[in-house]
Image (cartoon, helix red, strand yellow):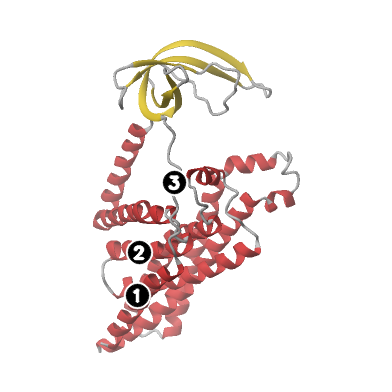
Amino acid sequence: MKNNLRMKVGLMIGLLFWLSSFILVYPAQAQTTGRDDSESAQAVVLKILDEKDLVRDNGQTTKQQNLELGVITGALKGQKYEYFGISDLDVVSSNVYKVNDKVSVNYSRGSDGKYVFYITDYVRSSALLWLLIIFIAAVIIIGGLKGFRSLVSLLFSFLIIMKVLVPLVLKGYNPLAIGLMISVLIALSIIYVTDGWNKKSHLAVISILLSLLLTAILSIIFSGFARLTGTAQEEVTYLMDATYQMINFKSLLLASFMIGTLGVLDDIAVGQVEAVNQIRLANSKLSDLQVFKMSMKVGRSHLGAIINTLFLAYVGASFPLILLFSLGNVPFISFSDVINNEDIATEIVRTLIGVLGLCLAVPISTLLGVWFLRRAEKSDH
C-alpha cells in the first residue's frame, strides 16, 4: 500500500509540474499575416514545349523548360495552362520534368488578369504512402501487439504536436514552457500506451520527467552561455514574415531540444527499469548495490550505442553542410570559423545536451528501479 501511495504521489507531482507550467506561459495573441492571393494545386505534364540547356560556372549542366500542364485538382481542374520556366535566372533546385510527371503548382493572376503558373516540386504522395504502408506492416508483423501500440502512441504524439503545440506557439505562448508540457503528455502516451499501466511504466515516466527537467535546465544555461539566438535557421525568416508578432525563437530552440531528447529518453528509461526487473527475477538474493551495478553495466552499453546513433543521425542530416565547411571557403576558412558559426554551434549544443540528458537518465531510472522494485518485492512478502 505504501509503495502504491508513493507511485501515486510521484504521478501527481508530474501532473502538477505539467499544470504549473501554465503559470510560465502567457498568450501574446500573435496574428498571422495571412497568405497572398496565390492558390495551389496538382498538375500533370502534358507536353514539353521548349527546352534550354544551361552550363554553370563549375561545368554542371541543367535544363530550363516551358511546359504544358493539365490541372488535376482544385478550382481549375481539367484546364490546361503553360508554365514558362525558361528565363535568365538559374534556379539551383530546379527539376527536369518528363511527360506524365505529376507536379505541385502555385498559381495567381498576373497584371493582365491571366493565370501565371509556378512549379514548386514533384508530387511525392504516392511514394510516401507506399513507404508508410510498408513501415506499418513491418512494425506490426515484427513487433506484434506492442508494435501496434507503438504506432498508436506515435500517432498520438504527431497529433498532439500538430494540433496542440504548434497552434499554441503561433498564438504567442512561451514555446519552452509549452514544449515541456507537451513533452510530458507525449511521454505519458508513449509509456502507457506501449507498455501498459504498471509499476515499471510509472517508474519510467518519473525517470523521464526528472531527466527532462534537468535537460531543460542545462539547455537554458548552455544556450545562454553559447549566446544562441535561435534565429540562425533559414526557416526563421519565413516565420518572421508569417506572423505580425515576433515569436520567441530562443525559447522555440530550447523547446526543440526537449522534444528531440524525449524519444531517446523513453528508450533509456524503459530499458533500465526493465533491466533492474529482470535481474531481480533472475536472482532475488542480490543486494540493492549488486543489482544497481549490474543494471548500470547494461545501461552503459545501451548508452554507448545511442550516443553513436544520435551523432550519426545529426551527421547524416547535415552532410551537405559538412561538405560545404570542408571546402574552406569564406566564411568557413578555419575550424574556429566553423564551430563559431551559430548553425553549427546550435547543433553541437543540441547533440551534447541530448547526450547529457541520456547520461542523467541512466542512473536516475536505475536508482528508481532498484529502490521501488525492491521495496515492492518486500511489501509482497
* Distance CA(mark 1)–CA(mark 2): 25 Å
Give residue 34's position: percent from left, percent from top. Answer: 43, 41
Residue type, label 2: Leu
In the rendered image, the vertical position of residue 378 relative to residue 57, given as above or below: below
**Cβ atoms under marks 3 and 1 closer than 8 Å:** no
- Residue designated by label 1: 277
Residue type, label 1: Asn
Give residue 48's position: percent from left, percent from top. Answer: 44, 12
Q: Which mark is residue 185?
A: 2
Quadrant position of the C terminus in the picture = bottom left
**Cβ atoms under marks 3 and 2 closer than 8 Å:** no
Give residue 131's position: percent from left, percent from top. Answer: 34, 39
Give residue 170's position: percent from left, percent from top. Answer: 43, 52
Residue type, label 3: Thr
Mark 3 or 1, nearer chain start = 3
- Residue designated by label 3: 32
* Secondary structure found at label 2: helix
Mark 1 or 2, nearer chain start = 2
Report the mark closest to the observer, 3 or 1. 3
Report the mark closest to the observer, 1 or 2. 2
* Distance CA(mark 3)–CA(mark 1): 51 Å
In the rendered image, the vertical position of residue 148 relative to residue 86, given as above or below: below
Residue positioned 35% across, 56% down in the render: 164
Q: Which mark is residue 45?
A: none
* Distance CA(mark 3)–CA(mark 2): 27 Å
Q: Residues within 10 Å of mark 3 (few under 14, many from 20)?
A: some
